[in-house]
Amino acid sequence: MSNTAILEVNGEKHEFPLIVGTENEIGIDIKSLRSVTGGVTTIDPGYKNTGSCESAITFLNGEEGVLRYRGYAIEDLAEKADFLEVAYLLIFGELPTKEQLDKFHTDIKNESVVDDDVKKILDAFPKSAHPMGVLASLTSALTAFNPSSVNVNSEEDMYKAIVKILGKFPVLVAWTMRKKQGLPLNYGSDKLGYVENILKMMFEKPNHDYEQSEILVNALDKLLILHADHEQNCSTSTVRIVGSSHAGLFASLSAGISALWGPLHGGANQAVLEMLEAIKEDGGDTKKYMAKAKDKEDPFRLMGFGHRVYKNFDPRAKIIKKAADEVLGDLGVEDPVLDIAKGLASEALSDDYFVQRKLYPNVDFYSGIIYRAMGIPVEMFTVMFALGRLPGWIAQWREMRLRKEPIGRPRQIYIGENLREFKSINER
Ligand code: ACO
């Protein structure tokens, strides 16, 4: 195989090296394109064909439905590891030893308190505010309470910033929900596990102790692992690009949360549940909504179907579908919305429109059903996604800074007016 690609522009041939990844993915290295061609650029809206970086964190093959964190299959991690082990793996590259994991957990617990003044910021939000907006603001506000910038040349400094955000973020998540529900703001306990503390902080009522349910702990652990990283998606690319200007970790994460909020990305899990509810309210006619999804005149899309990268199946959706069946069975939940979901999935899987376009249920199609069974309000679904994605964002930010990547600054092809003569206001 030749290790270069040749591009002919205006009758002149230019050679560009090929980069081959450890899984034999091939990239054309066009770093020199503009200089050798005198300013020619590439156009790739949505970056469908553009690699923004080389990364050693997550491998996915959308055609074959493969997802691996640091070389470990997502199926293995979801079954055998816990969320904190996976977080450590993603961020530092290797599964932790028992000592490393214990220290990591202790260090995180020691940081699981936020400045009391954060409560005043939270108080200023109306109860109607969307939790994702509140979470993005509070995460950004952490910068003000922790103003010293991270020295990325110091492993110790990096580590401190990482355990700080892993400790404080679940507190902000829980408070965001509690504020909406009018519940007093609380804290976790240093006797509990990371995921147990998330559940305690979210669901504890002021008048009685929160009893942990193994089913809920395991289900949330699995959901967080499945969402922990997904290479260069919209929010992760946002974290990397904001961080590439050397903005701090918390500011970069806050930008990632805003990117995740949109219904075409993390907001899809909320949109799925709202869609299923709407179908139920409208009599449960799944065929009517299948027809709407296929009608090009109708803006309706079947939320939770399709994926930019997975054009076969989403391996996370397989794991999560099984988990959803188990959790609902274990909790004894009979949910008519689940029947509608199952109906839509089976109709879509045998419908030409969906089959030809390779539109399969994605992870968000099922995650909302589990969150709902756990008693998490719909508006918090995307927040739960952010909680899971946090280690991935941190790992990607750390990698970007350690590799000393240049500031992200795409080019464009200008299609506006040519030079015009300025007219004074009376002449216009
Ligand atoms: N319902 C109906 N038709 C769809 C859907 C859908 N959910 N998704 C894609 N299509 C159709 C498009 O209309 C298009 O049809 P055409 O070729 O006849 O014009 C074709 O499939 C390709 O669609 P694109 O939008 O070009 O695919 P793209 O890769 O850009 O988008 C996306 C992927 C955004 C996920 C899209 O499938 C979608 O909007 N899905 C619904 C939202 C959703 O579930 N998002 C969650 C993504 S997963 C995550 O973020 C964790």
Image: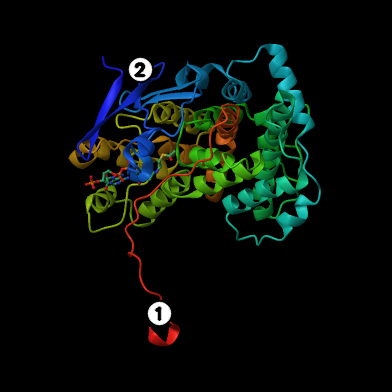
* Element marked by disc 1: loop
223 left or right, relative to 192: left
Residue 158: give x, y in percent of width and height.
69, 29
- Against 107, residue 370 (above or below) is below
Which-is-in-front pick, marks 1 and 2? 1
* Element marked by disc 2: loop
Q: Quadrant of the N terminus?
A: top left
Q: Residue at x 69, y 47 (%)?
A: 175
- Looking at numbered disc 1 in the image, what kind of residue is underneath it? Lys
Q: Residue at x 50, y 47 (%)?
A: 259
Q: Residue at x 57, y 46 (%)?
A: 255
Q: Residue at x 53, y 40 (%)?
A: 407
- Against 103, residue 40 (above or below) is below
Label disc, if present, on residue 24 of the rendered structure: 2
Decide if residue 34 is in sight here: yes
Q: Quadrant of the C terminus?
A: bottom left
Label disc, if present, on residue 423 of the rendered structure: 1
Which quarter of the figure has residue 225? top right
Beta carbon of the mark 2 residue lies under 8 A of ligand 1:
no
Residue 333: give x, y in percent of width and height.
49, 37
Q: Residues within 10 Å of mark 2 (few under 14, many from 20)?
A: few
Which quarter of the figure has residue 209? top right
Q: Report the Cα–Cα distance between label 1 and label 2.
A: 57 Å
Q: Residue furthest right?
A: 116
Total numbered labels:
2
Decide if residue 26 is in sight here: no
Beta carbon of the mark 1 residue lies under 8 A of ligand 1:
no
Label disc, if present, on residue 133 of the rendered structure: none
- Against 29, residue 137 (above or below) is below
406 left or right, relative to 366: right
Which quarter of the figure has residue 208? top right
| Mark before the other along the chain sequence, 1 or 2 | 2
